[in-house]
Image (cartoon, rainbow, N blue to C red):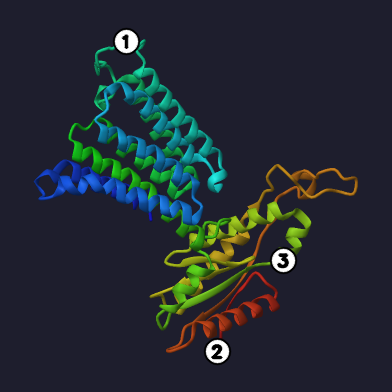
Amino acid sequence: MPRALSLVVPEGLVVIAAVALARFGASITGYAQVAEWLPAIILLAGLGLAWRFGRGRLFAALILLATLWGWVLGATSWEVRPALTIALAVVLIATGWARERGFRGWYIAVMLLALFAIGGWLLLLGSASYPASAAPSIAGPLSWTGLPQWEAVALLVAAAALLAASLVRADGVAQGALWATVAGWGALVIEDRAGALTLVAGGMAAMVTGTLESIYSAAYRDALTGLPSRRALDERLDALPEGAILAMVDVDHFKQFNDTHGHDTGDQVLRLVAWRLAEVPEAEAFRYGGEEFTLLFIGRTPAAAMTQLEGARARVAACKFKLRSGDRPKGKQGKTKRARDVVPHGLSVTISIGAAVRKEGEHPAALLKRADDALYAAKEGGRDRVVASRG
């Protein structure tokens, strides 16, 4: 999926649907009654998900969105809105950029501070010493947001920060927080109560959807390379049609490479190989485990697939892998070796590939075994080559 489209699907679609419902839902019979209950249903479902899977970022975001829900329900005065808006922006930024640490992450502390700030602001507003004032006028270059300047700045900064987090980390929770910011902004400026409640529910649903995407990614995607994992491959193999080509790929001399240059450098090699395999046209790449990968070709002739595999092998072999700075293997004197001390002109990485075509009625395990046997033959034949199964 193109990166720009992945920023919208699925979290953005949830909020876009909420915006459409808020805009056109008045003509639907019973819409106002459903809108009253919708945030509560999604909040309870989201909190249950957060507790069951230890997702503290989802919990923190939902709690702040719940305060926005309370603001809409109570028809609270505009004077509460600045504290609520800034607190919501800060917490959503924290949930989007933080690593998941369950309920012990620093984003929980940010959430608590935000709640204390909102509570303190409410106490200040309720004191007799606080002077009453008219609602601020909305003017200037940010008037299009429908919010006063500082509230608009807070949400725009949050949106920019969360867009960056979504692009850099490709994290579902960050994308959910981005779209929750959009939904929260809508709920703060819309005058229709049912519409505001719908947008709050949309923001909560975006966070829940992003968390589910994150859980799915952890289960079905390899964290190191970003490729689909062995579990995803196993499910794909069950539906593999007759004539599909499966190729097993192994990084040559990887253990020796790890022992010589360190595991961090070994990880860089695996990422490089994964990147090259992901570029193979009309193929699906998977991380099989360790230094092994898998490529699937569906709807391709064996000759065409072999041409693509040979091209992938050649592209990996042509790469000159340069060591990055950082921790390096230590020499005899206990000093860390620099990249220039270990290998002056870069490293060459090669792969061996074994391929097999699925026969009619063949079990996936048998197909894997034939491809693995071909891979073994490639290694026995001198490595850095592609071998097709003769079975």
Foreground: 66 or 352?
66
Q: For this view, does 210 lie left or right of residue 329? A: left
Mark 1 to mark 2 CA distance (whole Å): 87 Å
Instruction: Name the residue located 17 percent from the left edge and 47 percent from the top edge.
Output: 33
Q: Could you tell me the amino acid type at mark 1?
A: Pro
Disc 3 or disc 1, which is closer to the eye? 1
Q: Which residue is mark 2?
A: 391
Q: Secondary structure at mark 3?
A: loop
Q: Secondary structure at mark 1?
A: loop
Marks 3 and 2 close (CB-CB < 8 Å): no
User: Which label is found at residue 253?
Assistant: 3
Mark 3 to mark 1 CA distance (whole Å): 75 Å
Dividing the picture into quadrants, the one containing residue 324 is top right
Q: Work out whether mark 3 precedes mark 1 in sequence or the reverse, and give the earlier one.
A: 1
Marks 1 and 2 close (CB-CB < 8 Å): no
| Residue 50: x %, y % from top left | 45, 51
Dividing the picture into quadrants, the one containing residue 181 is top left
Q: Which residue is mark 1?
A: 131
Q: Secondary structure at mark 2?
A: loop
Residue 308, visible in the rendered structure? no
Marks 3 and 1 close (CB-CB < 8 Å): no
Instruction: Name the residue located 16 percent from the left edge and 45 percent from the top edge.
Output: 32
Foreground: 156 or 57?
57
Mark 3 to mark 2 CA distance (whole Å): 27 Å
* Quarter of the image with the N terminus in it: bottom left
The residue positioned farthest toward the right in the image shown: 333
| Residue 217: x %, y % from top left | 47, 58
Q: Could you tell me the amino acid type at mark 2?
A: Gly
